[in-house]
Structure formats: C-alpha cells, structure tokens
Image: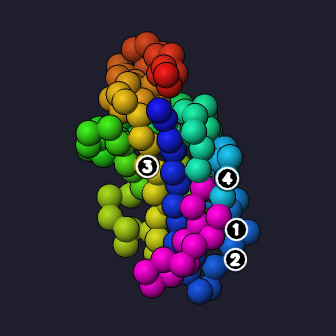
Amino acid sequence: MTKVVVTAELRPSEDVDKVKVAIANFFDYTTIRREKGGRFEVLIAESETLKSLTKVHRALREERILDAARKYMRRGVEGDRLTFMIHKQAAYVGKLTFVDEENESPLGPITFTIIHKEPEKVVDWLAPRTSRGRPLWENPIPDEG
C-alpha cells in the first residue's frame, strides 16, 4: 500500500489559497482538507499513488538538484516511510528548495510523508545517483502493489 501525505501549517497572515498553490505546484493530491493543529490550522493533502509526485520528479531534474535531493531524502527514510520538507514560499513561486529545520521556512515548511513498502526505491526513482550532475540511470516508478 502506498500513501502520500503532504502537510503545511496555515499561519494567521497566510492566504489558504496561496498555500494550496504552493502544495499543488509539487503534488497532485486526491483530497485536501483543513484541520485544527497545535498552534495553527493545518492543510493536509493526500494521495494513494506515487504518480502524485511526478512534479517533484520533474522539478529535481529541471532545477538540477538531484544530488542534494538524494542526500535529504535518504536521511528521511525510516522503516516504511520517507519524510522530507520543502520551503513553502519557494514552493509557491515554483522552486523546490529543501529545508533541514522547520524554522528555515519562516511560515513553516511543507512536509512530505511517503509510506511505501520500499522507501529506498522511491528515493532511487525521485533522485537517482548521478555523475557530474546527470542521472546514471532513470529508475521506473516503484511498484505500488
């Protein structure tokens, strides 16, 4: 079973539609909802297919950040999960920028959590190993069965 959950806090000064755009720039969600969080409301977008990450896959190549992305993503693998964060304001303008800490994105990050039986294969698909910045090979989208 595959599940992709993308979350973003809604700060009081933020326009919910702009946060939805930031998420949609890199994630083709099936459902999106607003929930009460700790200190802030949270937007939660979900999908049950890795195909929903095609925009991330494409952006990593267009922006030529495969090496950095692979490093960030590999650190986020734990059990059957892959978690990484991107900068919310950068995502709004169509730039994919990874963050290490939540405070690196002043209005909070967008957090991707991918649940898959083989998260390492998801990393290999999204951000394959490179030589001189070019993928050594392109991996097919991992089996979701």
Residue 94 position in % (x across, y down): 64, 52
At mark 1, the secondary structure is: helix
Q: Amino acid at mark 3?
A: Thr
Q: Which mark is residue 31?
A: 4
Q: CA distance from mark 4 to mark 1?
A: 17 Å
Q: Nearer the observer, disc 3 or disc 1? A: 3
Picture quadrant where residue 89 is located: bottom right
Q: Amino acid at mark 1?
A: Lys
Query: Bounds of the magenta span?
Result: 33-45
Q: CA distance from mark 2 to mark 4?
A: 19 Å
In terms of sequence position, does the residue under pointer 3 or pointer 4 come before the other?
4
Q: Residue at x 58, y 34 (%)?
A: 49
Q: Are marks 2 and 4 in contact (CB under 8 Å)?
A: no
Of residues 37 and 100, the one drawn nearer to the viewer in this rendering: 37
Q: Which residue is mark 2?
A: 15
Residue 22 position in % (x across, y down): 64, 59
Q: Residue at x 32, y 64 (%)?
A: 101
Mark 4 burial class by Cα count in 10 Å: few <14, some 14-19, many 20+: few
Q: Is residue 44 magenta?
A: yes
Query: Can residue 144 be seen at all in this image of the molecule?
Result: yes
Q: Nearer the observer, disc 3 or disc 2? A: 3
Q: Which residue is mark 1?
A: 18
Q: Which residue is mark 3?
A: 113
Q: Amino acid at mark 4?
A: Thr
Q: CA distance from mark 1 to mark 2?
A: 5 Å
Q: Left or right: where does residue 108 sit relative to residue 120? A: right
Q: Amino acid at mark 2?
A: Asp
* Residue 138 in the image: above or below residue 62: above
Q: CA distance from mark 3 to mark 1?
A: 21 Å
* Residue 124 in the image: above or below residue 90: above
Q: Nearer the observer, disc 3 or disc 4? A: 4
